[in-house]
Image (cartoon, rainbow, N blue to C red):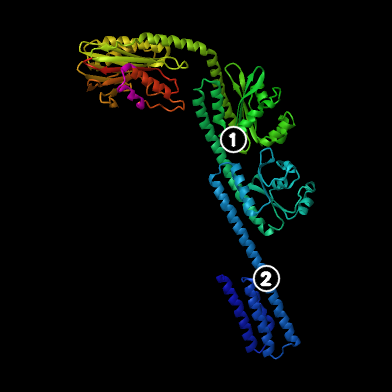
Amino acid sequence: MDPAERAWWLVGLALVAMLVVTDIVAQRQINGAFGIGAVVAAFWCSPLRTLAVAVVATVASVGSGVWHDDLGEPAWTVRFLTCLMLCAIALATATMNQRRRQQVQRTQLLAQQVLDALAVELTGARTVKEVADGFMGHAVAVLGAKSAMVLSLDPDEVLRTVTWDGRRGHGADQFQEVPLSSDVPGAVAAREGVDLHYRSVREIEAAFPSLAGYYTTELSLHVLPLRRGDETLGLLALTFPPGSFGPAEDGFLHSLAGALASALRRAHELQLADAATQRTALLAEASMTLSRSLDMEATLAEVVRLLVPRFADWCAVQLLRDGELETVAIQHRDAETTEWARSVGDAFPTNTDAPSGAPNVVRTGRSEIYTFISTDMVDAAAVDDEHRAILRRMGFTSAIVAPLRGRDRILGAVTLIHAESGRRYSEEDLTFLEEIAERVALALDTAATFEQQSERLAGVTLVAEAAQRAILAPPPPRVGPLALTARYISAGVEAQVGGDLYELVARPTSVRLLVGDVRGKGLGAVRTATVVLGEFRAAAAGGGDIAEVAREIDQRLVPYLPDVEDFVTGVLVDIDHDGRFSIVSCGHPPPVLVTADGEVRTIDLDHGVPLGLGTDPEPTHGRLRPGDRLLLYTDGLIEARSPDGSFVDPAPFLSALVDAPAEAALDDLLDSLKEAAGQSLDDDLALLLACFDPQP
């Protein structure tokens, strides 16, 4: 028993006992007042405890008639009936109080359950739609609602459905959009800012005759404006089985609507902040990725990947071809829905004379925004009944369309649509889409120009490649104690030939080697490579050490560089006839040493700046043993990429250099590298292999 209930029960019994003592001691019969003890107990005690006090009072009232010897007399009977009446009132009061307490406990429990669930839902929800959907599920499950509906009040003074659980057939379509001026419960509640509660269908139909026959089963309807301060954000509408929620719970429903309004306001603010962040991030990403593409299909695929689902539920790109708008890309956040849309797209061609949408944007060059897509707008866009049914099923809520402006004409249009996410586009979103459209149009224009000129570019590439091969003559098979072999591989046709180079100079007591890479591509790079080779031959023939050779090349090269930011990376090696060597690196990858006993390792070097930038390298010294091999290479070896875009690790392929003959070793290395890179290299590659063999 609750301590408070126990205390009041004892008070009731004590009061009966006190009245009995007074009745006996004062010799004045007051048995009619014995029921007061039960009345006192009834305010805090359960009906059962109150009944116990009432029984004690009744028995004491009979006892009073016995010790006053007037049992059954008219005066005693009146007082006895008074006692019974007080006991009956006490029992009725205790019963009503218990029901009231149970109602309060039920309301508190429901409130706690719903608010706890709402708090959990808000933890991850960042959009109005997510909050509304989460609330709906809990409202139906916890409160036992037959239906629950959240509507937003938009600036055009129309209530639009955000989410609806328990929707009733096609007749419910009339409540998808509710003008604030209409005569239906939701519009009245939102317009006047008051809660409306109807306990039966009869009450609903009496207040709104237009709804006669809409409700086919008995229920109660509760319509509550979602308000924050003086602002109405929308509406919450709930229906329950009859008798589930009475007037005592109206305050709870009002509080529930207030909590939902606060959650929706927070979600709306988060939604705006997230949209601004997404716009900034997407614009930066689009600028970076679209500028790299020279392929039409790849550009279109990148556009829809960028925008769906982060900024749209649907994205469509249409290009103007032969006077018709052709949908060349369409994407939905769901892959299966995307495939379905592509399969039915040809069945509903775009009407180029349409007064709105992509056709009008292409004609006028002016963007369009549809903050709210009404049912009338959907019907107007449909070409037939089947198309209308499909469009309605999509649940479009908002859309923006921007033209794709090429360098000298409008190429087409890009359309973004919100549907199941329930989000709305704003003017800021339209400005963002226009900026994205500018980048898309430029990328498409560039891709088209590239395709048109690809044959000419291929021809230029072949000329550059021929020039490159002309300046890179195969090395002699043997110079002094060194057996030499080299390979030059040009990149794919899509990339212009670069300035990869190699050369050797024989001296009386040593052999000097160079492998380098000119910054840039094409014939200009080949020209610079020719200058570097000539300067190396001149400097390497002198008496200075290999570091001095690098410094001389650096000084002589500067006047021939096309731009102050141009440079040449290189690694220079001086190998004496006894195997001692010196190496300097001018911003170039270090050589790989393959020892006679099979060890493969990269030589640690102090790297200087590239040639042409004032290099002053520090040499690294070592000694080759008979059978050791030294591989010099350009960055095409270490920057090759696999088809998935990841770098290819050449280390496993270098084992081919251990035992195989030099010519076969380089061929095996190149075959393995090409296979890992999908048979095509993105950059030129020069290899020079020096085998130390002092006694052939």
The residue at 51%/20% (across/down) is 294
Image vertical order of residue 466 relative to residue 58, above or below:
above
The residue at 61%/45% (across/down) is 133
Q: Given the image, on which type of amino acid does mark 1 rest?
A: Asp
Horizontal side of residue 266 vs 666, given as left or right: right
* Label number found at residue 334: 1
In-front residue for pair 425/33: 425
- Mark 1 Cα-neighbour bin, 10 Å: few <14, some 14–19, many ≥20: few
Is 666 contained in the magenta span? no
In the image as oriented, which residue stretches furthest toward the bottom?
A: 69
* Label number found at residue 695: none
Q: Given the image, on which type of amino acid does mark 2 rest?
A: Thr
Residue range highlighted in magenta? 651-663
Assess whether mark 2 and mark 1 are in contact (beta carbons under 8 angstroms): no
Image vertical order of residue 501 relative to residue 75, above or below:
above
SS category of the residue bearing label 2: helix
Question: Does any portion of residue 483 appear in the rendered image?
Answer: yes
- Eye-nearest disc, 1 or 2: 1
Look at the image and tell me in which quarter the N terminus lies.
bottom right
Circle 2 sits on which residue? 93
